[in-house]
Image: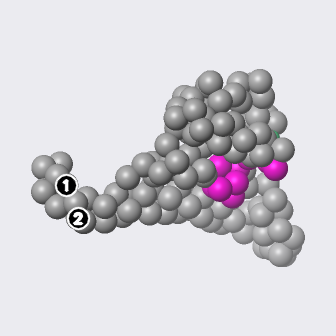
Amino acid sequence: MSEEIINKDNNELELEKMEKEAVEAIVKNEIIETEIKREKEDFSQQSTSLQDKKKFFFSKRVCKFCTKQVEESAINYKNVELIKKFTMPSGRILPRRISGNCAKHQKLITREIKKARILALLPFLDR
Ligand SMILES: [Zn+2]
């Protein structure tokens, strides 16, 4: 950690790297999961592989709020702990393809994140 303090440029570069790695790790996990599923399906049904691939595409991730893992009413700018989970370490809002939210709930979350940013509960950009 002491190396980061010595050079500001290095520090910024490392933060950028860390962010990229975090996002890449999430995406990689997704890819691995889908690949495993695809392999399983290939074993069971080889004839209808095209249809299976299409099915995967749509059933890969589900919205946490639609499946009631988290209450919809918990989406609030005051609930910083929850909202923070939908932001990157740098402060950017997680895209829907990674978080898996539906359009409705993603919109609610982004609105609350933006409110929280104005009230300085969350950073616009965290360097
Ligand atoms: Zn939803």
Mark 1 crowd level (few <14, some 14–19, many ≥20, 10 Å Cα): some
In depth, the one of 87 and 53 nearer the eye is: 87
In the picture, the disc for residue 75 is: none
Residue 74 left/right relative to 51: left
View extreme (front): residue: 118
Q: Position of residue 13 (x, y in %)?
A: 31, 65
In depth, the one of 31 and 15 nearer the eye is: 15
- Read off the residue under disc 1: 4
Q: Is residue 5 above or below residue 123?
A: below
Residue 84 left/right relative to 37: left
Q: Does any portion of residue 69 appear in the rendered image?
A: no
Q: Position of residue 58 (x, y in %)?
A: 81, 59
Q: Does any portion of residue 110 appear in the rendered image?
A: yes
- Read off the residue under disc 2: 10
- Residue type highlighted by circle 2: Asn
Does the beta carbon at disc 2 come under 8 Å from ligand 1?
A: no
Quick one: label 2 or label 1, which is nearer the N terminus? Answer: 1
- Residue type highlighted by circle 1: Glu
Residue 3 left/right relative to 98: left
Q: Position of residue 115 (x, y in %)?
A: 66, 37
